[in-house]
Amino acid sequence: MTTIRKFCCNDLLRFASVNLDHLTETFNMSFYMTYLARWPDYFHVAEAPGNRTMGYIMGKVEGQGESWHGHVTAVTVAPEYRRQQLAKKLMNLLEDISDKIDKAYFVDLFVRASNVPAIKMYEKLGYVVYRRVLRYYSGEEDGLDMRKALSRDVEKKSIIPLKRPITPDELEYD
C-alpha cells in the first residue's frame, strides 16, 4: 500500500535512489531545505511499506496577478514503481493545493524537450506546451514550459501558447 505524506527533513537522507534517473534534476541540500521551509504544502513523498521512498514531488507557488501559479519543480518516481499512476497522484495533489488553497490560475512545469514519455504523461494530465525555452537545460537542451489552467482561469488565458521560442534570460522569475 502506498502512503503519500508531507516530505520531512529525514526524507532527504532516504531519497537518493529515486534521483538516480538521468532525467531527474538533482539539487544541492540547501535547495531542498529552502523548498521544505518556504513551501511545505508543495513537497510530498510517496512511500511503500517499510518506509521505502517510491517518489516525490516538490514545488512552490509564485507570481503576481494573473501570473499567480503553482510550479512543479521536480516530480520523480523510482523506476521499480513507475506505471502505477503514482506521478499522476502526486501531480493531482500539487494541482489541488494550487487550485483550492492558494487560488492559483495555473500550474506550470519545465521538461526536457527530449523526454517524450514525460511529455506524453503531462499531456494526458491536461498540460499543454505553453512555450519552448531554448537551451534551458545546462545551456544545451531545450525545455518545454507546460501549463495546465486551474478553475480560477475561467477563460484559460494562461495556456494560450506563445508563438515563438524564448531564451532563459526572457523568463520571469518571482
Image (cartoon, rainbow, N blue to C red):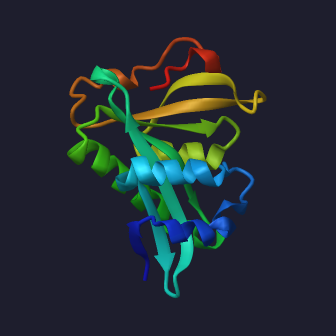
Q: Is residue 85 visible to the viewer in this orientation of the structure? A: no
Residue 19 placement: quadrant = bottom right
Residue 77 placement: quadrant = bottom right
Measured as percent of width and height from the top left, residue 63 is found at 37, 27
Residue 70 placement: quadrant = top left
Measured as percent of width and height from the top left, residue 128 is found at 46, 33
Measured as percent of width and height from the top left, residue 136 is found at 67, 28
Q: Is residue 120 above or below residue 33?
A: above
For the C terminus, give its image quadrant: top left
Residue in the image at 34% along x and 47% along y: 95
Camera-nearest residue between 146 and 83? 146
Task: Count every numbered label the image shows and give the total.
Answer: 0
Measured as percent of width and height from the top left, residue 172 is found at 49, 20
106 relative position to 141: left or right:
left
For the N terminus, give its image quadrant: bottom left
Residue furthest to the top? 163
Camera-nearest residue between 45 and 79? 45
Q: Is residue 168 above or below residue 93?
A: above
Residue furthest to the right? 140
Q: Is residue 106 above or below residue 29?
A: above
Q: Is residue 163 above or below residue 74?
A: above
26 relative position to 87: left or right:
right
Residue in the image at 72% along x and 62% along y: 20
Camera-nearest residue between 65 and 13? 13
Residue in the image at 62% along x and 49% along y: 117
Q: Is residue 64 visible to the viewer in this orientation of the structure? A: yes
